[in-house]
Amino acid sequence: MLFDAYNRAFEGCVLAEHAWGPELAWYFYCGYDSYADFAKKSTVLMEIHESELADAKTDIRNHSDDLMVRIK
């Protein structure tokens, strides 16, 4: 879902997986030709975030979410 938004906005990105010890992470690598091109593609990305992802249930949690679950 998130990678698709970046991939569409930047017209092609690479999704990489990284594992180091207990960490398992995914990174997006997206290209641009200039700072102006980056600004244009970032604007497209923000529009996608606002119109499609702002209220989407992504099930993405961060460390503080994990802590809150444990305390409950």
Image: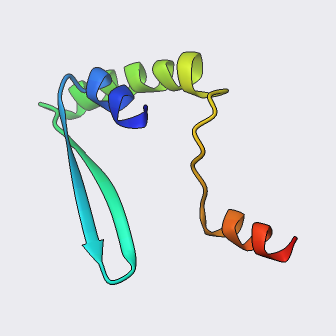
Choose top left, top right, bottom left or bottom right for residue 61: bottom right
* In the image: residue 29, left or right of residue 52: left
Against 5, residue 59 (above or below) is: below
Against 17, residue 48 (above or below) is: above
Residue located farthest toward the right when viewing the structure as drawn: 72
Question: Closer to the camera, 14 or 46?
Answer: 14
Question: Closer to the camera, 29 or 65?
Answer: 65
* In the image: residue 2, left or right of residue 63: left
Tag count:
0
Choose top left, top right, bottom left or bottom right for residue 3: top left
Which residue is at a point 56% across and 26% down the rendered structure image?
53
Against 46, residue 64 (above or below) is: below
Residue located farthest toward the bottom when viewing the structure as drawn: 21
Q: Quadrant of the N terminus?
A: top left
Against 35, residue 27 (above or below) is: below
Please provide percent x and percent y for residue 18. 25, 65
Which residue is at a point 21% across and 53% down the rendered structure image?
16
Which residue is at a point 23% across and 34% down the rendered structure image?
35
Please provide percent x and percent y for residue 36. 24, 26
Q: Quadrant of the C terminus?
A: bottom right
Colour theme: rainbow
Which residue is at a point 57% across and 38% down the rendered structure image?
58
* In the image: residue 46, left or right of residue 67: left
Question: Closer to the camera, 11 or 33?
Answer: 11
Please provide percent x and percent y for residue 52. 54, 19
Question: Closer to the camera, 61 or 32?
Answer: 61
